[in-house]
Image (cartoon, grey):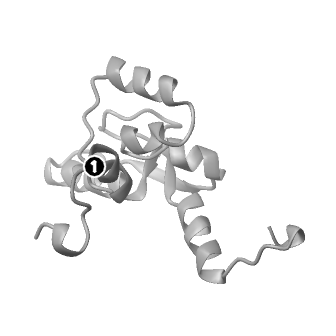
Amino acid sequence: YVSQGASIHDKHLEVIVRQMFSKMRVKDAGDSDFIQGEVISKTRLSEENDKLKKEDKKQMIAQSTLLGISKVALATDSFLSAASFIETSRVLIKAAMEGKEDRLLGLKENVIIGKLIPAGTGLKK
């Protein structure tokens, strides 16, 4: 962008880089339903490992991974958010075949369906 005369503030680059490093690649699935090599969010990994720990089962082992910005957008937990970016038909067909449900936790998916965003007065406590 800079080479074409556009200026970018550092905080915007920080957000992009944080998203690019926000995923983990499963090295050992332990007793979970995930498979080795699957890419999941750090939040999902933490939730699953907490559940496995409570059940006294083997926890997952994962490694931080760098994804390109397009792959990060498609690897989100929200299929509505992923479908709004690229490959809309493929994302929606895959979600339907897998019987996925979108928990509508992010800003983008709530805007898509015309619901209050989870911020400000729309934030549920």
Residue lying furthest left? 125
9 displayed left or right of 37:
right
Residue 97 in which image quadrant: top left
Please tell me which residue lies in front, 70 or 29: 70
Q: Position of residue 23 (x, y in %)?
A: 50, 54
Quadrant containing the N terminus is bottom right
Q: Is residue 93 above or below residue 58?
A: above
The residue labelled by disc 1 is 48
Q: Amino acid at mark 1?
A: Glu
Q: Total number of numbered labels?
A: 1
Residue drawn at x 43%, y 32% is 35
Residue 86 in which image quadrant: top right
Q: Secondary structure at mark 1?
A: helix
Q: Is residue 36 above or below residue 77?
A: above
Q: Position of residue 41 (x, y in %)?
A: 42, 52
Residue drawn at x 26%, y 61% is 117
Q: Residues within 10 Å of mark 1 (few under 14, many from 20)?
A: some
Q: Position of residue 38 (x, y in %)?
A: 49, 37
Q: Is residue 4 above or below residue 64?
A: below
Please tell me which residue lies in front, 75 or 8: 8
Q: Is residue 11 above or below residue 17?
A: below
Residue 71 in which image quadrant: top right
Please tell me which residue lies in front, 79 or 111: 111
Residue lying furthest front? 114
Quadrant containing the C terminus is bottom left
94 displayed left or right of 25:
left
Residue lying furthest right? 3
Residue drawn at x 41%, y 58% is 42
121 displayed left or right of 59:
left
